[in-house]
Image: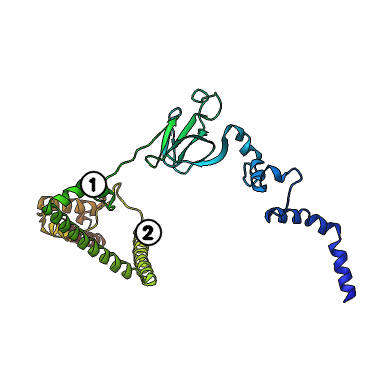
């Protein structure tokens, strides 16, 4: 055990441990207010006032109290509402933070009036800038207004006034003082207002019940997801079937797409009656007979039985072609 203790002591006395634990005790003493600086004199005030005058306890440091002898304290100021810069005409949103100089400029009874001065930090051109630099640098001066429980824009900016109708925003509309006085003086007006409020409350409750039922229906997300995926699968199969039918049909023979077949088109096509043109059939028959007749036909006066047999065969072939031509013409025109 003595050997382990000896090794632990050597480890704590090593340079690495001393470097890691440097000023830890001093910081802990400062945090616990047990540390007293050498330049502090108890006869000149408390330790807290001494540290505040030096600018400690704030991220600005000494810069925060550089003009404290003039009554100016540097703080972080947060814009209480939306304003517009009068120089660059840009809007500055509510909650934007600035480094501001805080100064007491008066009293309203026993309440002090403070003034906050800061500069616009919106990037703009050199022509619009107040000092010809990259930023606008317009000076803003905002004072507290204890009388109206508000802020007063003294210099460099103006408030953006936003108005809306509670009915359009679907928010609660409070009774204004004039309406309240009228309801107190006129019983009928009070009754009408009460009935109107009861009807609105009933409508709102019905709407809330509908929303609650809708939320209950949508509570089972697994079932909803299954229904949605099932419909997507059916639609995807239909798309694949259409693409396969188009692929099997091959390229179309027309320059424009044809409309799909319908029963009405089929009925109109069946109602059309084509009349047979017998003149055309006779002409076609004659032409077929002429084509079937050989160019160098032998006459029967030759006396040879072979030539007669060939003539009969050719005549039979011509008749068969004629019959075939008749059947073709009948199918085509009739």
Dot 1 or dot 2: first in sequence order is 1
x, y (%) of residue 222? Answer: 39, 71
Q: Secondary structure at mark 2?
A: helix
Residue drawn at x 66%, y 39% as measured from the top left: 62
Q: Residue lying furthest bottom in this view?
A: 1
x, y (%) of residue 74? Answer: 57, 38
Q: Which residue is mark 1?
A: 177
Depth order, front residue of 141/220? 141
Depth order, front residue of 296/195? 195
Residue drawn at x 37%, y 59% as measured from the top left: 247
Q: Which residue is mark 2?
A: 247
Between marks 1 and 2, how big is the CA–CA gap? 76 Å
- Tell me if 126 is positioned left or right of 147 in this view: right
Residue drawn at x 85%, y 57% as measured from the top left: 15
Quarter of the image with the N terminus is: bottom right
Q: Secondary structure at mark 1?
A: helix
């Amino acid at each position: 055990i003595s050997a382990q203790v000896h090794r632990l002591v050597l480890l704590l006395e090593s340079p690495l441990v001393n470097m890691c634990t440097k000023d830890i005790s001093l910081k802990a003493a400062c945090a616990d207010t047990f540390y007293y600086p050498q330049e502090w004199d108890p006869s000149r005030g408390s330790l807290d006032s001494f540290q505040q005058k030096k600018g400690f306890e704030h991220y600005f440091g000494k810069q925060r109290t550089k003009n404290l002898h003039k009554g100016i304290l540097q703080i972080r100021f947060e814009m209480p509402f939306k304003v517009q810069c009068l120089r660059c005409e840009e809007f500055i949103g509510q909650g934007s933070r600035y480094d501001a100089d805080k100064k007491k400029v008066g009293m309203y009874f026993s309440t002090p009036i403070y003034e906050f001065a800061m500069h616009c930090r919106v990037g703009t051109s050199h022509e619009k800038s107040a000092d010809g630099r990259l930023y606008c640098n317009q000076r803003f001066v905002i004072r507290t207004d204890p009388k109206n429980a508000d802020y007063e824009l003294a210099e460099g900016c103006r408030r953006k006034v936003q108005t809306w109708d509670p009915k359009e925003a679907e928010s609660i509309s409070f009774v204004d003082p004039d309406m309240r006085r009228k309801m107190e003086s006129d019983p009928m007006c009070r009754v009408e207002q009460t009935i109107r409020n009861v009807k609105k409350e009933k409508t709102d409750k019905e709407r809330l019940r509908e929303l609650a039922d809708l939320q209950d229906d949508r509570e089972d997300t697994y079932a909803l997801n299954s229904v949605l995926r099932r419909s997507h699968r059916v639609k995807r199969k239909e798309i694949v079937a259409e693409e396969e039918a188009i692929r099997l049909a091959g390229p179309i023979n027309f320059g424009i797409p044809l409309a799909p077949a319908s029963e009405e088109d089929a009925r109109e096509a069946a109602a059309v009656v084509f009349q047979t043109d017998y003149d055309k059939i006779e002409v076609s028959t004659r032409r077929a007979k002429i084509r079937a007749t050989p160019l160098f036909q032998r006459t029967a006066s030759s006396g040879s039985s072979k030539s007669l047999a060939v003539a009969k065969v050719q005549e039979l072939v011509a008749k068969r072609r004629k019959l075939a031509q008749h059947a073709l013409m009948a199918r085509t025109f009739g």
